[in-house]
Image (cartoon, rainbow, N blue to C red):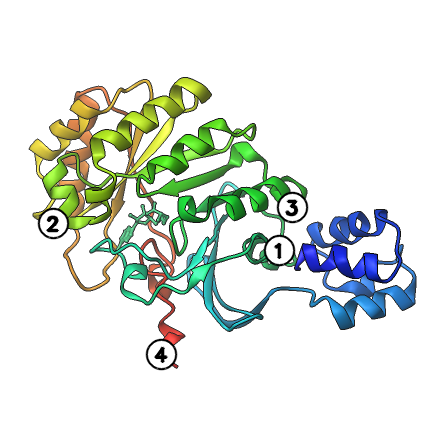
Amino acid sequence: MDLELLDTTLADLGQPPFRAKQVWEWTARGTAGYDAMTNLPAPLREQLAERVPFSTLEVENEARSKDGTIKVLFRTVEDQRPVEAVLMRYRDGRRSLCLSSQSGCPLTCTFCATGTMKFGRNLTASEILDQALHFRRTEDVDHVVFMGMGEPMMNLDNVLAACRRLPDVGVSHRHTAISTVGWTPGIDRLAEQDMPIRLALSLHAADETLRSRIMPVNDRHPLREVLAACNRFYDRKKRMIFIEYVMLDGVNDAPEHAVQLAQVLDPKRFKVNLIPYNPTGSYDGSDRRTIEDFRATLEEHGIGATVRLTRGQDIDAACGQLAAKALAG
Ligand code: SAH
């Protein structure tokens, strides 16, 4: 729901300010539409239904994985841009949402499918929230990661505005994580926020040359500066930072890469999450043995490391696969 349009519409209609709060409370709790908002006068509900679309997104397609993961392809109501979001269901009951911050992505990480599609635009705060609200209407959700399409730090104002409202939807700031390629100004700004949001860094190579090769953004924000920004974040927030590291066969998965990675990270500040590569065409993924050895080498050097469970691969909902295949159509 376009919350600014809601405010101006309510003002136009001469409604008292508390109406916006009432509408938001219903919406955040997963209400299906204005009809159900029984503490609003019926004529007002009708006027709102006419003037403020209940969502800024329309569902174009929904795919369900056999592991319970659901991927939704939305279009922005305003200009039909593709936006994808994923709900992951875990055995322990956790319900985690992977949200997009942009339609497409302007960066060109060589292993990521989103990077190969055309960049559209930044999403508004309402378009970001509406992804979460879509899922909230069918079940409770408790975690959010900004690991869908786009680079959240390049649209940080809108991402933070959405985060500010997530607790009403059921997701605390501590259960919210923003993942970045290492956009240093954004990392510094996140560190200044009062909200205790987690930081995750997509690192993928501990060597400047290799990192620039697989992530061209490294030329603009070199690893050394990115890690310095992460250390400033830690000094300020005292919150562990997650390092994402996608395992590419013969590219960044040798034991010496693990040693190098351990050398640039302070074990008190960083934890590593190794990501099995989800096929997008350009690389082969490391095999399980190699990934396990890499993890063991990191641990030997004192760095905590886990291997990410791959979810939704059969529906192209896994990391790096959100390229809106239906785009062509
Ligand atoms: N732009 C931000 C947010 C997107 S997060 C960022 O890059 O951090 C998406 C995560 O999935 C990133 O860690 C990204 O590096 C990873 N990823 C991209 N392509 C992948 C692939 N093909 N297989 C596995 N992980 C991938």
What residue did someone put label 3 on? 169
**Left or right of 22 in this view: 115:** left
Contact (Cβ within 8 Å) of mark 3 with mark 2 = no
Kindly report the distance in space between the C-alpha atoms of the residues bearing marks 2 and 4: 30 Å
In x, y percent, where is residue 101? 46, 53
Amino acid type at mark 3 = Val
Instruction: Find disc 4 in the rendering and name its residue.
Output: 328
The residue at which mark 1 appears reads as 133
| Residue 32 appears in the rendering | yes
Where residue 104 appears, as percent x and y from the top left, is: 38, 62
Residue farthest to the bottom?
329
Measured along the vertical axis of the image, is residue 10 above or below residue 183? below
- The front one of 88 and 208 is 208
**Which of disc 4 and disc 3 is earlier in sequence?**
3
Residues packed near mark 1 inside 10 Å, few (<14), some (14 to 19) or many (20 plus): many
**Mark 2 lies on residue:** 249
> What is the secondary structure assignment of the residue under circle 3?
helix
